[in-house]
Image: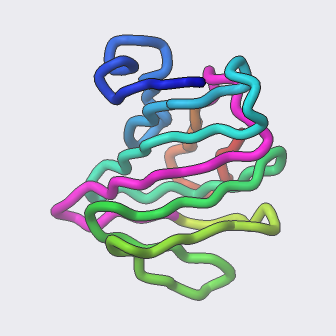
Amino acid sequence: MIIRTFADIQNTDRNVDWGNGRSYRFLLESDNMGFTLTETTVNAGTESLIQYDNYVEACYCIEGEGEIECESKIYPIKPGTMYAPNAHDKHYLRASQDQALRLVCVFSPALKGIETHHFNEDASEASGY
């Protein structure tokens, strides 16, 4: 049985600056569950061009508002919205200007825990792990 609280990971290497927010990584590869579970914050007013070539991800919004843009289609995100780039889709993740997004995310296969995004200044290339 694995029991871990948000407070348990606050001052550990499971609290990761992923590039435009924080990723609180509750489950990692070393936990031998086969997937990763995170609570992820996306800083207000940020735009992230993301594409995961090695993972699939599903995110469920629990706080804040923003949008996903994929193939020129824009989908609003608000509490109660789930999105899953299930075909390794390149997508823009945007948080509203005045409020951070708070997401619960699942990655498969599991993350090692050290992964972070590296965004180039003109946002012409997607970041991923």
Answer with left or right where residue 117 lies relative to residue 78.
right
Magenta region includes residue 67: no
Q: Which residue lies furthest to the top in this view?
A: 12
- Estimate the x, y position of residue 53 in percent, counting from the top left: 82, 50
Q: Is residue 99 magenta?
A: yes
Q: Name, please, the residue furthest toward the left.
A: 98
Range drawn in magenta: 93-115
**Residue 47 vertical placement versus 38 (above, below):** below
Tell whether 56 sits left or right of 127: right
Image quadrant in which you'd find residue 64: bottom left
**Would you place residue 126 above or below residue 71 in this image?**
above
Along the line of sight, the residue nearer the viewer: 85 or 72 = 85
Question: In this figure, which colouring scheme has been used for the structure?
Answer: rainbow
> Where's residue 114, x and y in %?
62, 21
* Residue 22 pos. (x, y %): 39, 36
- Closest to the observer: 27 or 122? 27
Q: Residue 66 appears in which quarter of the rendering?
A: bottom left
At x 78% / y 36%, what residue is drawn?
Answer: 34
